[in-house]
C-alpha cells in the first residue's frame, strides 16, 4: 500500500484514458462517466498536489456518483430520440396487434402463438381460436382484450 502514497495527477489522467478506452471497446455508457471522474480528480490533484490518497479516492467516488446521477437525471427528462424505440423491449413491439389464441384463457391466463414463439397472456376467459388484441405488456406476459 505504500505505492498509494505516491499517486500523482498523471496517474489519474492515465486511469481516465484507460476508462474511456474501456468504454469504447465495451457496450454501454458507464465507464465514460468514471473516466470523467478520474479526469476531475487528476485536475484537482494538479491544482492541490498535497492531497492524500484517501481523499483522492473519496473525491473520485463522489465525482463518479455525481456524474452518473446527473446523466441519468438528464436522460430521464430528455431521452435519446431513436427510430426504433422498442428495439430492446420485444413485447412492446406487439402492442395493438390482433392475435389468435393458441390455448384458451382459463382463470385469466392462457397462451398465444406469435410467429414462432408462445407467449403467456392475461385477460378475460376465452376459448382457443378467439381473436385478442395486445393492450399491455408485463415483462413477458401480454395483457389482452377480446376483439
Image (spheres, rainbow, N blue to C red):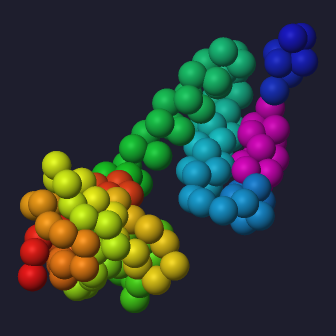
Above or below: residue 67 compared with residue 92: above
Q: Nearer the viewer, residue 136 or 53?
A: 136
Magenta residues, dominant SS class: helix
Above or below: residue 65 compared with residue 129: above
Q: Is residue 15 magenta?
A: yes
Give, as a single range, the part of the protein colored magenta: 8-19
Q: x%, y% of residue 142?
A: 27, 64
Q: Quadrant of the C terminus?
A: bottom left
Q: x%, y% of residue 78?
A: 28, 68
Q: x%, y% of residue 35?
A: 65, 49
Q: Say which quarter of the image contains residue 140.
A: bottom left
Above or below: residue 143 compared with residue 92: above
Q: At x 35% / y 54%, what residue is drawn?
A: 139
Is residue 122 in sight in this rendering? no
Q: Say which quarter of the image contains residue 99.
A: bottom left
Q: At x 40% / y 78%, what residue is drawn?
A: 114
Q: Quadrant of the N terminus?
A: top right
Q: Is residue 138 left or right of residue 91?
A: left
Q: Say which quarter of the image contains residue 127.
A: bottom left
Q: Is residue 93 magenta?
A: no
Is residue 6 in sight in this rendering? yes
Q: Is residue 63 left or right of residue 134?
A: right
Q: Is residue 127 left or right of residue 90?
A: left
Q: x%, y% of residue 122?
A: 21, 57
Q: At x 44% / y 68%, what residue is drawn?
A: 118
Amino acid at each position: 500500500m505504500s505505492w498509494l502514497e505516491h499517486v500523482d495527477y498523471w496517474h489519474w489522467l492515465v486511469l481516465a484514458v484507460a476508462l474511456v478506452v474501456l468504454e469504447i471497446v465495451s457496450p454501454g455508457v458507464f465507464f465514460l462517466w468514471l473516466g470523467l471522474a478520474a479526469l476531475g480528480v487528476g485536475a484537482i490533484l494538479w491544482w492541490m498536489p498535497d492531497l492524500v490518497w484517501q481523499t483522492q479516492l473519496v473525491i473520485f467516488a463522489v465525482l463518479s456518483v455525481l456524474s452518473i446521477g446527473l446523466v441519468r437525471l438528464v436522460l430521464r427528462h430528455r431521452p435519446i430520440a431513436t427510430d426504433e424505440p422498442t428495439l430492446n423491449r420485444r413485447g412492446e413491439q406487439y402492442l395493438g396487434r390482433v392475435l389468435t389464441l393458441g390455448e384458451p384463457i382459463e382463470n385469466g391466463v392462457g397462451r398465444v402463438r406469435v410467429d414462432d414463439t408462445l407467449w403467456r397472456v392475461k385477460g378475460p376467459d376465452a376459448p382457443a381460436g378467439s381473436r385478442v388484441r395486445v393492450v399491455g405488456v408485463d415483462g413477458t406476459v401480454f395483457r389482452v382484450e377480446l376483439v
